[in-house]
Image (cartoon, rainbow, N blue to C red):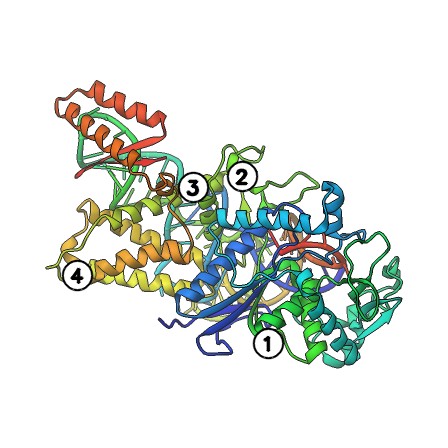
RNA sequence: GGUCGGGUGGCCGAGCGGCUAGGCAGAGGUCUGCAAAACCUCGUACGGCGGUUCGAAUCCGCUCCCGACCUCCA
């Protein structure tokens, strides 16, 4: 299936047709987490967004190589302390133990949110050689300088000669040039404040250290992504993604490093996701405006009145566009939870139905086909999941209408109905990555189904005898167990609330 | 302060020159033993002030708020 996909390229700030370098194949690199503490909910939004992008590219027929790194060295804090080392002190573990622990936690969370694993997940510490080679290339090309065993990228020289520095993040070169010397402060080794480390000489207490031509030290934060994307996707690849807040300096510096090392642009398309807010403000640990994924699941937080399931949260995320900020509020989550259930229940309803062999195409047939086509068009328009969901919900109304006889099944041909069944389900599960939690909860046993069948059958008998007291007793008892009975024309079905 | 992005009905959130998504909540109705679910119908919103246009939530100017980035950050 070929689709006319358009993506918003933050490099040129325009929505443009997507054309991969190699027909039918896509190389995509997404900046992964720094594994020194538990994964933040905002990270989850970004990775869910790229998960949908990955899923959609695959769905429309591309062979996608999705690379998402694990940063386990070089990413420093404000005060210059290495993030990984901070983790080791806090938990009395070695760096690799810290990395493993939080990598495991990250993977668990991605699985919880039903995100597919990337094709390749390289670690920064596993690519020290590649990083050293890249530093050497940058030095050979004259865009780096060595001071006391550390290597820095010369942004001023690069900006003047290559004219690309600041393009991605919208920085103005003049601003960089006129920046005050005061900013140098404790970074006195740098010639200019905007210069950044390619290789850092390790201080005696710094336990993550490797040999290099310049010193025993460790690589700079931005370098790993340049080195690993080059190794696994080539010098120039199709898509580079990440959170909006990485645009500067991280991504800007990645561009500089690639151009500086091989005179090549790393990626043709840059995709950036926007931030997740809570109650209108950015999530921040310092002022308490934050909630962790486990807290959100359990409801153990002053910011929510109850817990929300991972799929309800995923649905909530998909109801906004990935380039928009998303405001997480208790009220919005409740709305999303209900919407998610309505969608999944409609799919279950649909899958239990079948078309009529002797039907002839009428208005319904036409409209159903149009809605399906539109849902794909919305996805083709820069992965517009909220609009695609809107089309899906219009199909939900059709499905329920056909189910209760409100709409004429005779107007929908068997082939259209089959298309609806398979596409609707594929859209939800394969493209949007939503799974049915209510069904998954039974975990493959037919015991609950069997018991419910018995209970519903018994209730049917007492209702036939107009024994409403008994009927309501069964219904109320089930409600207490969070099981909802749904009395329809063709009998009673149930759903776990 | 610099750069960028926003302010849409009760809430969330699309749209970005005419055809005025969708979800949740609300109102009325159908169905039902009663409910629930489902279905049908209904709220006409675009921060403020000007301007361009036959026509603006959508373009331009001013203004007021909010958010992000500015070398910690998905």
- Looking at the rendered image, the quarter that the C terminus of chain A falls into is top left
Q: Residues within 10 Å of mark 4 (few under 14, many from 20)?
A: some
Closer to the chain start, of discs 1 and 2, is: 1
Could you say where residue A51 lies in the image, as x and y percent from the top left? 49, 58
Question: Circle 3 sits on which residue?
Answer: A337
**Residue A350 in sight in this render:** yes
Question: Circle 4 sits on which residue?
Answer: A362
Kindly check if marks 4 and 2 are in contact, taking CB atoms under 8 A apart as contact. no
**Residue appearing at x 89%, y 66% in the figure:** A148
The CA distance from mark 3 to mark 4 is 34 Å
Q: Which mark is residue A436?
A: none
Marks 4, 2 in one chain: yes
Task: Say left or right for A357 vs B71.
Answer: left
Closer to the chain start, of discs 4 and 2, is: 2
Question: Secondary structure under badge 3?
Answer: helix
Residue farthest toward the left in the current orientation of the protein: A358
Question: Circle 1 sits on which residue?
Answer: A236
Question: Circle 2 sits on which residue?
Answer: A296
Question: Secondary structure under badge 4?
Answer: loop
The CA distance from mark 1 to mark 2 is 39 Å
Marks 1, 2 in one chain: yes
Could you say where residue A115 lies in the image, as x and y percent from the top left? 48, 53
Kindly check if marks 4 and 1 are in contact, taking CB atoms under 8 A apart as contact. no
- Looking at the rendered image, the quarter that the N terminus of chain A falls into is bottom left
């Amino acid at each position: 299936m070929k689709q006319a996909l358009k993506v918003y390229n933050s490099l040129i700030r325009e929505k443009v047709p997507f054309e991969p370098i190699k027909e039918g194949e896509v190389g995509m690199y997404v900046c992964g987490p720094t594994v020194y503490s538990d994964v933040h909910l905002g990270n989850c939004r970004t990775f869910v967004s790229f998960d949908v992008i990955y899923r959609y590219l695959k769905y429309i027929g591309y062979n996608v190589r999705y690379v998402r790194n694990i940063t386990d060295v070089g990413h420093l804090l404000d005060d210059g302390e290495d993030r990984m080392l901070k983790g080791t002190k806090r938990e009395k573990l070695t760096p690799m133990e810290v990395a493993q622990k939080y990598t495991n936690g990250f993977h668990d969370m991605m699985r919880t949110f039903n995100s597919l694993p990337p094709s390749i997940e390289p670690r920064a510490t596993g690519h020290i050689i590649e990083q050293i080679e890249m530093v050497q290339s940058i030095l050979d090309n004259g865009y780096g300088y060595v001071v006391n065993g550390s290597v820095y990228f010369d942004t001023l020289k690069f900006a003047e000669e290559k004219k690309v520095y600041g393009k991605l993040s919208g920085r103005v070169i003049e601003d960089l040039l006129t920046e005050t010397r005061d900013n140098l402060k404790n970074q006195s080794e740098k010639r200019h404040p905007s210069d950044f480390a390619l290789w850092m000489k390790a201080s005696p207490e710094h336990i993550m250290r490797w040999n290099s031509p310049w010193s025993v030290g460790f690589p700079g934060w931005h370098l790993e992504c340049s080195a690993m994307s080059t190794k696994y996707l080539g010098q120039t690849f199709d898509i580079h993604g990440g959170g909006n807040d990485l645009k500067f300096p991280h991504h800007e510096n990645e561009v500089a490093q690639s151009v500086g090392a091989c005179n090549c642009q790393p990626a043709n398309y840059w995709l950036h996701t926007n931030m997740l807010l809570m109650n209108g403000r950015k999530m921040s640990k310092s002022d308490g405006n934050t909630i962790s994924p486990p807290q959100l699941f359990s409801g153990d937080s002053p910011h929510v009145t109850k817990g929300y399931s991972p799929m309800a949260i995923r649905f909530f995320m998909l109801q906004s566009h990935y380039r928009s900020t998303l405001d997480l509020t208790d009220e919005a989550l409740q709305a999303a939870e209900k919407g998610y259930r309505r969608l999944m229940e409609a799919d279950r309803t649909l899958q239990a139905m079948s078309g009529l062999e002797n039907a002839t195409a009428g208005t319904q047939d036409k409209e159903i086909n149009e809605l399906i086509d539109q849902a794909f068009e919305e996805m083709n328009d820069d992965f517009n999941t909220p609009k695609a969901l809107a089309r899906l919900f219009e199909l939900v109304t059709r499905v329920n209408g056909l189910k209760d006889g409100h709409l004429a099944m005779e107007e929908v041909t068997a082939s259209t109905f089959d298309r609806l069944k398979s596409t609707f389900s594929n859209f939800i599960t394969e493209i949007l990555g939503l799974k049915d939690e209510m069904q998954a909860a039974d975990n493959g046993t037919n015991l609950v189904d069997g018991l419910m069948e018995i209970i519903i059958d018994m209730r049917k008998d007492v209702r036939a005898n107009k024994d409403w007291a008994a009927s309501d007793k069964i219904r109320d008892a089930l409600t207490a167990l969070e099981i909802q009975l749904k009395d329809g024309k063709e009998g009673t079905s149930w759903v776990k609330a």
